[in-house]
Amino acid sequence: MTITITAFEQSPDGGQGLARDTRVRWALEEVGQPYEVRLVSFRAMKEPAHLTLHPFGQIPTYEEGDLALFETGSIVFHIGERHAGLLPDDANARARAITWMFAALNTVEPTILELATARLLEGDKPWYEERLPLVEDRVRSRLNQLSARLGGADWLDGAFSAGDLMMVSVLLRLKSSGILNEFPNLAGYVVRGEARAAYKRAFAAQLAINTAKRPTG
Ligand SMILES: N[C@@H](CCC(=O)N[C@@H](CS)C(=O)NCC(=O)O)C(=O)O
């Protein structure tokens, strides 16, 4: 059955891989499933056809036969459930991998998004300089805890899993901030994720879209 995902027609990051279709592409590449991509503009994302697929008017979405999903946590979980390669067979190890997916999305990503929002949208506010260190420290606090848990291991719980895919995807947003480098084991963890052949294919596919020459006029 054909899998179709949606992605930005033109990502605001210009192809750095931070748009969330990258993590879905990565998951599909890890399990060896081909997929098609439907590109959507910001305007189209807010129109009824797309809102039927995604009630919040965002990307990515995932369609497979008569199944339509949104939310990358749910999409990556679904891919891991249907195909070998992202979730361990052992029931307890599988439950722990799923726990790490939730941890990435619920416990780590919010602090990182808060920092991104502060930097992108609040730079002109009179309280920006005062608030920024507080926001950065909240990120550091989470990274400190994550770093302590990862220790010298390659991945969070044994072999690479959907939990690592999601955690690396979330941490990637910090690459340009310098904060990640304060935690060398986490920086190395992200590099290991980026070095996976499946990630490289996913990254290249989204980059190709974002650097493609567009017709003018
Ligand atoms: N929690 C959602 C977040 C989706 C999300 O924020 N998508 C962004 C792109 S990475 C988007 O569509 N932004 C445009 C908008 O919200 O208007 C998920 O993980 O899928």
Image (cartoon, helix red, strand yellow):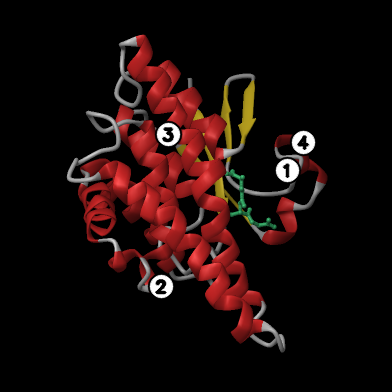
Label 1 or label 2, whichever lies nearer to me, is: 2
Which of disc 2 and disc 4 is earlier in sequence? Answer: 4
Q: Which residue is mark 3?
A: 100
Local SS, label 4: helix
The residue under the point 26% across, 33% down is 160
Q: CA distance from mark 1 to mark 4?
A: 5 Å
Q: Which residue is mark 2?
A: 177
Mark 3, Cα crowd under 10 Å, few <14 / some 14-19 / many 20+, is many
Toward the right, the furthest residue is 48
Q: CA distance from mark 2 to mark 3?
A: 23 Å
Q: Amino acid at mark 4?
A: Thr
11 on left or right of 35: right
The residue under the point 32% across, 30% down is 161
Q: CA distance from mark 4 to mark 2?
A: 36 Å
Mark 4, Cα crowd under 10 Å, few <14 / some 14-19 / many 20+, is few
Examine the rendered structure and indicate whether residue 123 appears above or below residue 115: below
Q: CA distance from mark 1 to mark 3?
A: 30 Å
Label 4 or label 2, whichever lies nearer to me, is: 2
The numbered disc on residue 50 is 1
Res 92 quadrant in image: top left
- Residue 100 position, x and y percent, is 42, 34
- Residue 214 position, x and y percent, is 50, 70
Q: Which residue is mark 4?
A: 52
**Proximity of marks 2 and 3: CB atoms separated by less than 8 Å:** no
- Residue 21 position, x and y percent, is 49, 47
**In-front residue for pair 97/31:** 97
Q: CA distance from mark 3 to mark 4?
A: 29 Å
Examine the rendered structure and indicate whether residue 47 appears above or below residue 118: above
**Proximity of marks 4 and 2: CB atoms separated by less than 8 Å:** no
